[in-house]
Image (tube, rainbow, N blue to C red):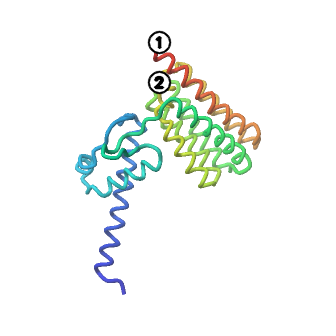
Amino acid sequence: MVSATAHASAIELLQSHSLTTLVQRELERRILAGDLAPGDKLNEEALAAQFNVSRGPVREAFRALESSGLLRTEKNRGVFVRQVSIDEADEIYEVRAGLDELIGRLLASRIQPGQLTQLRELLKKMQHAARGRSVEHYYPLNVQFHDMLAQFTGNGTLLNHYRRLVNELHLYRRETLARGPDSFPISTREHAAIVDALARRDGDRAGELMYEHAMESRERLHAALKGRRQ
């Protein structure tokens, strides 16, 4: 028979995990939305007070977000929103392009009709947001689109690696959209072509398109950064 003390401890553990998840999701939302910028320092005590929780869930959320590539911990300095140099971004884009190609090839033979319907519905939302040239509306849909492709492969290991790379690149992906005047229509056309290739179950073409999409995103990033310096 489980003792009352053990039962209470189990409930406390579940509550703590739930609070950690809520704090983690909110911090992730703020980082991806640009409310917390790369290099910003996070104060554990202040955030605990803000979320009306103890410091434990905030500390655990920090650890999870560091593992996912969004935060970094510096000894004797604290926890910061991670900054990625342009050289690191170049390398990450190359790795991401390889994973994107794999996703396209795998998914072409695995995708289900209902999944294609979900992708096409999301595409319509993206096209609507693109017409308004709203980074705030378009960027989360773009992230959701690529995450959905990775999810639909059914390969959890691939998904975990992919999500970390996407998190590390999020700042530059937002900047490409914000500073590249042609980014919105190009992005939506490329996404539509990927879905069409998946619908035809053409793994070679889907893989090729996804690889090119990632590498062209890198080139658009460099063009956007060059424009910023001028």
In this picture, residue 78 sits left or right of residue 166: left
Viewer-closest of 39 and 150: 39
Q: Are marks 2 and 1 in contact (CB under 8 Å)?
A: no
Which label's residue is closer to the chain start, 2 or 1?
Answer: 2
Residue at position x 28%, y 48% from top?
44
Mark toward the viewer: 2 or 1: 1
Q: Quadrant of the N terminus?
A: bottom left
Q: Which residue is mark 2?
A: 178
Whole-Å distance between the Cαs marked 2 and 1? Answer: 16 Å
Residue at position x 39%, y 34% from top?
38
From what the image shows, is residue 42 above or below residue 182? below
From what the image shows, is residue 16 above or below residue 224? below
Q: Residues within 10 Å of mark 2 (few under 14, many from 20)?
A: some
Residue 145 x %, y %: 57, 40
Residue 106 x %, y %: 71, 48
Residue at position x 40%, y 52% from top?
63
Q: Secondary structure at mark 1?
A: loop
Q: Which residue is mark 1?
A: 230
Q: Secondary structure at mark 2?
A: helix
Residue 184 x %, y %: 55, 25
**Which of the 4 image quadrants contains residue 11?**
bottom left
Residue 15 x %, y %: 33, 64
What amino acid does circle 1 point to? Gln
Q: Residues within 10 Å of mark 1 (few under 14, many from 20)?
A: few
From what the image shows, is residue 203 above or below residue 182? below
